[in-house]
């Protein structure tokens, strides 16, 4: 199957700093990318959907100024957690889909810990 | 809000036994997919079943879909220790690319 690479796999940052997470499609054009958040032993909650070259569409309750998403190319999307706080600590996962595909492919996830 | 509910929430079985997980959803769907997640890792796609299909097989996996009951089941036959993971169903609707995930089943295979 297609490969989605997410980086970093884990990161620890201080409160108040910003953290950027990258999601790359390695062998296909990711016309749509999705960002999810997952708390321990819980399911994935969709945060936002981004289409290449367009602004991201955020789910209800997700602060767009807090979680900045950029999808500037067909192979790269980034999620920046701005002014991170301990409550932002979570597992963040991206997935990507090419137009016309039914299946979405997932990155390995990023464990964010804010101290 | 969460689209799917899965049961059981947790399941422990002996290696070699079959494992069955169920997923129920609330609204009409286009496709239903099953994913596996090992602890602290990303998701691996297992199988997709379309709304006009009733059953699908892939290796040791068997998926059924009952759109009248808005439910699906995933059967893993002859389980192995490596099958230990969380399993999620995910649905998408016609004209909507978003995947909405179920609550998941944590499967433990006892060697």
Image (cartoon, rainbow, N blue to C red):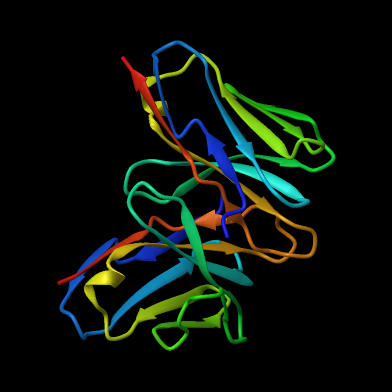
Q: Position of residue A48 (x, y in %)?
A: 54, 73
Front-most of residues B59 and B24: B24
| Quarter location, residue A93 | bottom left
Where B55 sits versus B33, above or below?
above
Q: Position of residue A9 (x, y in %)?
A: 29, 61
Q: Is residue B6 left or right of residue B92?
A: left
Where B46 sits versus A111, above or below?
above
Q: Residue at the spot x=54%, y=17% of the render?
A: B77
Give the number of marks.
Answer: 0
Q: Residue at the spot x=32%, y=85% of the render?
A: A82
| Quarter location, residue A57 | bottom right
Q: Position of residue B54 (x, y in %)?
A: 79, 31
Front-most of residues B65 and A106: B65
Front-most of residues B48 and B12: B12
Q: Position of residue A42 (x, y in %)?
A: 41, 50
**Residue at the farthest right position:** B52
Quadrant location, the C terminus of chain A: bottom left
Where B40 sits versus B98, above or below?
above
Front-most of residues A82 and B56: A82
Q: Is residue B69 left or right of residue A86?
A: right
Q: Is residue A34 left or right of residue B83?
A: right
Q: Residue at the spot x=41%, y=51% of the render?
A: B42
| Quarter location, residue A22 | bottom left
């Amino acid at each position: 199957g297609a490969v989605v690479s997410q980086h970093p796999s884990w990161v620890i940052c201080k409160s108040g700093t910003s953290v950027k997470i990258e999601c790359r499609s390695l062998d296909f054009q990711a016309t749509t990318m999705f960002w999810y958040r997952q708390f321990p032993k819980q399911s994935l909650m969709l945060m936002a959907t981004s289409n290449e070259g367009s602004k991201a569409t955020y789910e209800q309750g997700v602060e767009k100024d807090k979680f900045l998403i950029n999808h500037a190319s067909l192979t790269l999307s980034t999620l920046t957690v701005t002014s991170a706080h301990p409550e932002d600590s979570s597992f963040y996962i991206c997935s990507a889909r090419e137009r016309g595909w039914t299946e979405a492919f997932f990155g390995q996830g990023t464990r964010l810990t804010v101290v | 809000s969460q689209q799917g509910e899965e049961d059981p929430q947790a399941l422990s079985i002996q290696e070699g036994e079959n494992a069955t997980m169920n997923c129920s959803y609330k609204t009409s769907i286009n496709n239903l997919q099953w994913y596996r997640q090992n602890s602290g890792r990303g998701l691996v796609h297992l199988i997709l079943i379309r709304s006009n299909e009733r059953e699908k097989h892939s290796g040791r996996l068997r998926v059924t879909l009952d759109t009248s009951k808005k439910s699906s089941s995933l059967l893993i036959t002859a389980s192995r220790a490596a099958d230990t993971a969380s399993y999620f169903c995910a649905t998408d609707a016609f004209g909507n690319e978003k995947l909405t995930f179920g609550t998941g089943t944590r499967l433990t295979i006892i060697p």
